[in-house]
Image (spheres, rainbow, N blue to C red):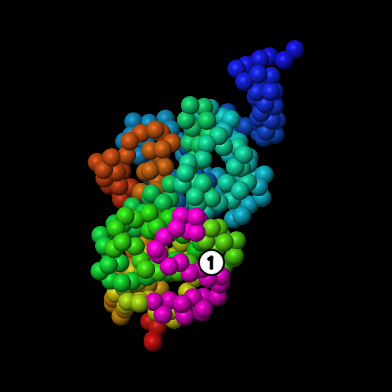
Amino acid sequence: MDRDVSGGSNTWHAMEAASLSETGIKNTYKIIKKKVPTFYFIGVTTGQSSIMKVFPRWMEALGEPTTIIEGIDHKLHDVHEKYRQTVAQIKYDPLSIGALITSHKIDVLEAAEDMFDVLDISSRLTDEISCISKHDGQLVGHALDPLTGGMSLDAILGREYFARTGGYVLCFGAGGAGKAVALHLIQKDRPGDQPKRMIVVNRSQPRLTKLRRMVDDLGTDINFEYIRNENPTRNDEIMINLPDGSIVINATGLGKDRPGSPITDKGLFPIHGIAWEMNYRGALDFWHQAKAQEYSQNVTVEDGWLYFLHGWSEHISEVLHTDMDNATFIELSEIAEELRPPLQYKPRRYPHP
């Protein structure tokens, strides 16, 4: 006999089918029952990250000394079942409390979207997940990069940067970080905080297509240009045509997860411009290339440390359900600074026009 629950037998059957489907998914994966609250770091070379040393000290400061961090390394563009295993561990183990995702933000969503109960609006807009948390028994996917990357970019540029300089934005990489930068600039209220033009270069077409779709859906006065290219020499040519004061961003894994840089040593940065290397560790070829022109081109060179601080603090705040006010952020930044890996410029041959 069918049970009538508010919506009738059809509703009951739908609920029963969903429950059976959920049980089937759960039974597919091996779930390790954690003994203490565990925060996961999903990346490529997680053991090399400063967060492994910083995290325990941050937990002490936040009054969560029993919470630990565990890295899960995936190959770039790993097989879907491995991503699903990772998400299942967080979803079905009560003490697996959430995660920060770096290089797999788009891949995790593509592989495991059906395993999430809720996706926030930024995740829907960017087609990525950078944070996994739990709320009232539901697994929630967030895209926090537009917030955290935006906070870092605002600190680098200051107010009305584009009105003051007339510069463009050239972003190498159309993945999660590149999309986040685009979304942040699109959502700016003051026209002077938006460039007239943003050029995005990516080595494959699918991510450019998804970025274009997001931009078209939102609508913006920023003139976007999408270029599919993986030849560093061609990227040099794109960069040399930028107006003075432009910002060039390395939002790829090159120099961290993969060797190299999107440009060559001969590439000229825009005069009075800004070079932003979004990574803070690794070979950081792009950062060293920019430092070589710090004086000859009057380039302001930024690395990814501030992005690291904003990213991790906001993700931890979301997973632990704590407020991240300015005083707390400053305290955590001071703790992390003591453990920051040294970044020393290695001279490169100066390019000549």
Q: Residue at x 33, y 71 (%)?
A: 167
> What amino acid does circle 1 point to?
Asn
Where does the image place residue 292, in percent across and percent down from the top left?
A: 36, 76
Q: Quadrant of the N terminus?
A: top right
The residue tagged 1 is 202
Q: Residue at x 59, y 42 (%)?
A: 113
Question: Does residue 294 appear to the left or right of 283 in the view shown?
Answer: left
Q: Is residue 241 magenta?
A: yes
Can you see residue 50? no
Label 1 Cα crowd, 10 Å radius (few <14 / some 14-19 / many 20+): many
Q: Residue at x 38, y 50 (%)?
A: 148
Q: Quadrant of the C terminus?
A: bottom left
Q: Residue at x 39, y 63 (%)?
A: 221
Q: Is residue 3 magenta?
A: no
The tally of labels here is: 1
Which quarter of the picture shows residue 323? top left
Where does the image place residue 83, in percent across and percent down from the top left?
A: 61, 45
Can you see residue 136? yes
Image: magenta residue range: 214-242
For mark 1, give the secondary structure: strand
Of residues 79 and 15, which is closer to you in this image?
A: 15
Where does the image place residue 58, in percent across and percent down from the top left?
A: 35, 39
Q: Is residue 80 above or below residue 172?
A: above
Question: Does residue 204 appear to the left or right of 64 in the view shown?
Answer: right
